[in-house]
Amino acid sequence: MMTEFLRRPEGVIAYDDTLSPGPLVVCVPSLGDVRGEYRFLRPLLVQAGYRVVTMDVRGHGESSTGWPDYAAASVGADVVALIQHLNAGPAAVIGTSMAAAAAVWAAAEAPELVGRIVLVGAFVRDMPMPFFQKIGLGAMLAGPWRVAAWTAYYGSLYPTAKPADFAAYRAALKKNLAEPGRFAAVKGMLAAPKAPCTARLGQVQAPALVMMGSKDPDFPNPAAEAAWLAEQVRGRVVMVEGAGHYPHAEMPAVAGAAIVAFLQEGAASIGA
């Protein structure tokens, strides 16, 4: 697949497209990661009969840098624009971590374009952080060691089973994040409030699947956070036992089967 680009008023979004027949699924990666995050889930979705588009969010991967803001709501607007550009909706939208908030915003903003959402390891609200963690995070992101520190932390997000290509993938991610403007995007997304997305949880009409790894280190109680979110969007929860922040990459067979089953329930509503 060749990288394609969606031109937005403030920058360019990179994406790839399997161009396979079937309903459209748009996959949106987490903060600090790139569209390759979905390298294991994508073939499972194609095999199940879906057209899969994976995108790089603002400032990440092959998307342009220097955006005026990196808020989840703005990423959600990019998702809506991409579906409109492809003229293939309604689509299912899969969002990981911060991108789950973007998926929520897109579903609330354009219900005619978003037929289903899958929210993985979802950060959809601003979480309180103990003072010592704030200090530690600030120190990690402030110095010349920030890319190395971030990619070292990235390893902790796969607590049980790292992918076979993990070392090479993390090395490529580290190289990408070291490019000019990339880490500014990471910091911008971390700093941006999620309140505009949180406020739209009750507006989501699309059926929703909330997927969470039982060992996700980003949440004090992953199961409780998943249950809270599912209640807000009137969705269901799938807990992936032993997985961390990326169940679809750490345990793709288990997570992928659950996602495919959920999407197939609504194949008629997603459209071809």
Image (spheres, grey):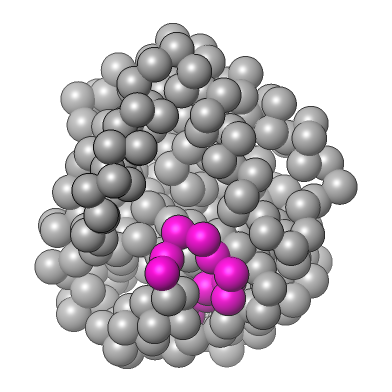
Q: Does 4 sit above or below residue 176?
A: below
Q: Is residue 271 visible?
A: no
Q: Residue at x 17, y 49 (%)?
A: 193
Determine whether, in the image, residue 130 is placed left or right of residue 267: left
Q: Does 184 sit above or below residue 81?
A: above
Residue reaching furthest to the front: 132
Q: Does 103 sit above or below residue 59?
A: below
Q: Is residue 214 magenta?
A: yes
Q: Is residue 253 visible?
A: yes
Q: Quadrant of the C terminus?
A: bottom right
Q: Residue at x 69, y 33 (%)?
A: 170
Q: Residue at x 19, y 25 (%)?
A: 68
Q: Is residue 172 magenta?
A: no
Residue 197 place in picture, x, y as percent: 20, 60
Residues in magenta, as a range: 206-220
Residue 94 place in picture, x, y as percent: 50, 62
Determine whether, in the image, residue 70 is placed left or right of residue 113: left
Determine whether, in the image, residue 146 is placed left or right of residue 24: left
In this view, the residue in front, 148 or 22, is 148
Tally of numbered discs: 0
Residue 63 place in picture, x, y as percent: 46, 26
Residue 40 place in picture, x, y as percent: 75, 55
Q: Quadrant of the N terminus?
A: top right
In this view, the residue in front, 87 or 42, is 42
Majority SS type along the magenta span: loop
Q: Quadrant of residue 110?
A: bottom left
Q: Residue at x 41, y 69 (%)?
A: 220
